Image (tube, helix red, strand yellow):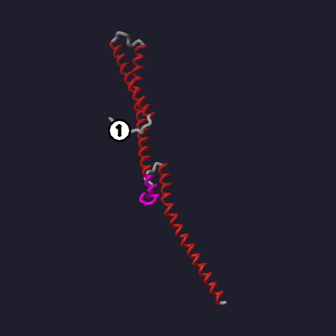
Amino acid sequence: DGETAFLRSVRENLLKLGLLLLAAVSLAAFFVAGHITLPIRQLVTAAAAMEQGEWEAPIDRDRPDELGTLALRFDEMRKRQRTYVRSLQEVARAKSEFIAVASHELRTPISIIRGWEDLMRGGMVKPGDDSYHEGLDAIVRACGTLEKIAVSATRMAQNDDADSLPEPTVTD
């Protein structure tokens, strides 16, 4: 009876010790998993934020392990992407502005050419008149303006086809 009681006591103590060790290991595993998955979750969150245009989602770049190295590389990539996206946005803005200005600038020479054409066809301006030569000069100037706009549009199209990244510059 004494030995059986002793063995039962040992069994109960071993069971308690096992449960205590199981709880300690579970708790340690929880903290280790959190230590490992937190930076990965930060990177996933930062990547999702980048898709939305948010470039400053926090990530832990100060870890001395592989996850810290991964975070540093991710941050470098994020900075390059931000620069690239901003340059694309600037190019799109410049292109839209150019199209708006070009559209406006096209109307003036076209109006001049059509106006003088109407005057000449209507017989209000005849060859040999001073105004006839003024009209031809105005048409030549208007055509020059149209050619400049066409050259600018061609350059803009060539820039679209270029493989290099755009480099915005300040101009008048």
Outermost residue to the front: 3
Q: Nearer the viewer, residue 106 or 35?
A: 35
From this view, report whether residue 39 is shown above or below residue 155.
Answer: below
Q: Residue furthest right?
A: 1
Quarter of the image with the N terminus in it: bottom right
- Left or right placement of residue 26 versus residue 108 in this view: right
Q: Which residue is farthest bottom?
A: 2
Query: Magenta residues, as a range?
Result: 59-75
Q: Is residue 11 magenta?
A: no
Q: Residue furthest top?
A: 128
Does 96 appear above or below 3? above
Residue at 38% x, 13% y is 125
Give the side of residue 89 with respect to residue 5, left or right.
Answer: left
Callout 1 crowding tier (Cα within 10 Å): few <14, some 14–19, many ≥20: few
The kind of residue on which mark 1 rests is Thr
Q: In x, y percent, where is residue 111?
A: 41, 23
SS label for mark 1: loop
Horizontal arrangement in the rendering, residue 41 relative to residue 102 (left or right): right
Task: Say which residue appears at 37% left-offset and 39% top-offset.
Answer: 168
Give the residue at mark 1.
Answer: 169
* Residue at 44 percent of width and 52 percent of height: 73
Looking at the figure, which quarter contains the C terminus?
A: top left
Residue drawn at point x = 51 percent, y = 65 percent: 32
Where in the figure is residue 139, as x and y percent of width and height? 38, 19
User: Where is residue 132 drawn, in percent x and y?
Assistant: 36, 13
Could you tell me how many numbered marks the image carries?
A: 1
Above or below, 30 relative to 18: above
Picture quadrant where residue 99 is located: top left
